[in-house]
Image (spheres, helix red, strand yellow):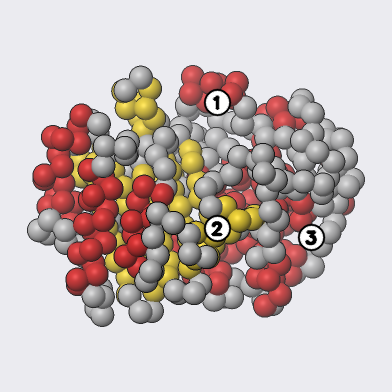
């Protein structure tokens, strides 16, 4: 990227207000380790294979403390440096939020995970999909429903042509329903955003409130995630510290930050605005069991379905649970969480239980690869880990 050469030498001082290779640290955090993490982030940024204008990374754990790093630009046009507390669109990471609310409602006996779509949604919705009487809430959560994804090439073109369009859920459902099912309910696995749009409707049917209101009350406000928002459709306001997201078109960085928050809805897209530290806190609270009443609920969330060999999934993917992904990295290192891709952002939030470390991050370019920054960091944090195996 041409703009990298112009800013590479100044970014490390502008981003953090500290000398190069330094990052803000909290009490008890190893300063030497912090320098290694920031250096790894900088090296990933300088790599000629990378395409992202900027990146954020957050690492936390009882043994390592909490560290936040940043590199590159949050706004290419204004040459504004990325800062550790920048907000961004977290895309499909919202699926984990939706899953938590669904599981909370299950605990409240509003419905069962084995209830069919016809038992939890009105006929005006279920009649769109053949086999809806055999598709359960659990199948929607773990992508075994067979319902096609509405995110087709044609839809991506419509979104790009009119970024500020306010989308209706029925528009997504109709696009999905016009396609043939991937497979009979429960017989295979295929990621589909449509599943989570339907789960958003199930939340609304069970509570009488919008899925946004339920996520805000049950998770965002409960955990005091002060930098996390779910803007209503049509609300395009962003804070001054909001990172811009870019899409590479013919070598030109196109700013896709202002896509309406209705894009993808409960499936993710531009709906969720957050920070790396808020995402880390959210995932930690899940693993600590503080968002569920019963221990068995987390066990259900962590029951994974393996994808077939021909399915397009992220590298190292080892299964999909209820709004939770499992990865098996070289050296049998387990990692759990979720990733997200939307107009201009590539984000992730992962927990490594053996190491008791949480890592969250984002790159503000859709074409980026999460492992460009994640793997070098894990080589520092996980003793003996190498991505070269």
Q: Secondary structure at mark 3?
A: loop
Q: What residue does disc 1 label? A: 156
Q: Secondary structure at mark 1?
A: helix
User: What quarter of the picture does the N terminus occupy?
Assistant: top left
Q: Using the image as rendered, state which of residue 361 and residue 293 is in the foreground.
A: 361
Q: Is residue 58 above or below residue 255?
A: below
Residue 242 on image: x %, y %: 33, 45
- The residue drawn where x is 37% and y is 71% is 383
Q: What residue does disc 2 label? A: 327
Residue 82 visible: no
**Badge nearest the viewer, 2 or 1:** 2
Left or right? Give the position of 25 relative to 99. left
- The residue drawn where x is 84% and y is 59% is 114
Q: Residues within 10 Å of mark 3 (few under 14, many from 20)?
A: some
User: What quarter of the picture does the C terminus occupy?
Assistant: bottom left
Q: What residue does disc 3 label? A: 113
Q: Using the image as rendered, state which of residue 207 and residue 179 is in the foreground.
A: 179
Q: Are marks 2 and 1 in contact (CB under 8 Å)?
A: no
| Distance CA(mark 3)–CA(mark 1) | 31 Å
Residue 267 on image: x %, y %: 60, 44
């Amino acid at each position: 990227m041409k703009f990298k050469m112009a800013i590479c030498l100044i970014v490390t001082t502008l981003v953090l207000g500290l000398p190069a290779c330094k990052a803000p640290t909290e009490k008890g955090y190893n300063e030497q380790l912090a320098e290694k993490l920031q250096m790894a982030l900088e090296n990933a940024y300088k790599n000629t294979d990378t395409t992202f204008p900027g990146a954020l990374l957050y690492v936390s754990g009882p043994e390592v403390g909490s560290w936040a790093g940043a590199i590159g630009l949050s706004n290419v046009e204004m040459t504004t440096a990325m800062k550790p507390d920048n907000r961004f669109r977290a895309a499909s990471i919202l699926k984990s939020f939706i899953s938590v609310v669904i599981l909370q409602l299950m605990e409240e006996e509003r419905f069962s995970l084995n209830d069919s779509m016809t038992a939890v949604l009105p006929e005006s919705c279920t009649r769109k999909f053949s086999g809806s009487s055999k598709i359960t809430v659990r199948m929607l959560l773990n992508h075994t429903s067979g319902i096609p994804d509405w995110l087709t090439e044609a839809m991506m073109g419509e979104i790009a042509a009119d970024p500020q369009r306010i989308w209706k859920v029925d528009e997504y459902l109709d696009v999905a329903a016009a396609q043939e099912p991937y497979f009979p309910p429960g017989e295979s696995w295929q990621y589909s955003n449509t599943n989570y749009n339907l789960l958003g409707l199930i939340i609304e049917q069970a509570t009488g409130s919008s899925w946004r209101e339920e996520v805000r009350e049950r998770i965002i406000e409960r955990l005091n995630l002060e930098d996390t928002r779910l803007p209503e459709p049509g609300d395009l306001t962003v804070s001054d510290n909001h990172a811009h997201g870019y899409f590479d078109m013919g070598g030109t960085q196109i700013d896709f930050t202002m896509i309406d928050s209705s894009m993808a809805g409960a499936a993710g897209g531009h709906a969720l605005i957050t920070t790396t530290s808020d995402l880390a806190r959210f995932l930690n609270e899940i693993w600590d069991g503080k968002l569920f009443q019963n221990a068995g609920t987390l066990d259900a969330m962590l029951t994974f379905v393996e994808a077939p060999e021909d399915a397009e999934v992220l590298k190292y993917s080892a299964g999909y649970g209820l709004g939770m992904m499992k990865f098996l990295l070289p050296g049998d290192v387990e990692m759990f969480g979720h990733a997200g891709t939307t107009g201009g952002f590539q984000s992730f939030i992962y927990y490594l239980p053996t190491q008791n470390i949480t890592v969250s991050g984002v790159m503000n370019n859709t074409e980026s690869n999460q492992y460009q920054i994640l793997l070098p960091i894990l080589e520092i944090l996980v003793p003996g880990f190498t991505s070269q195996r």
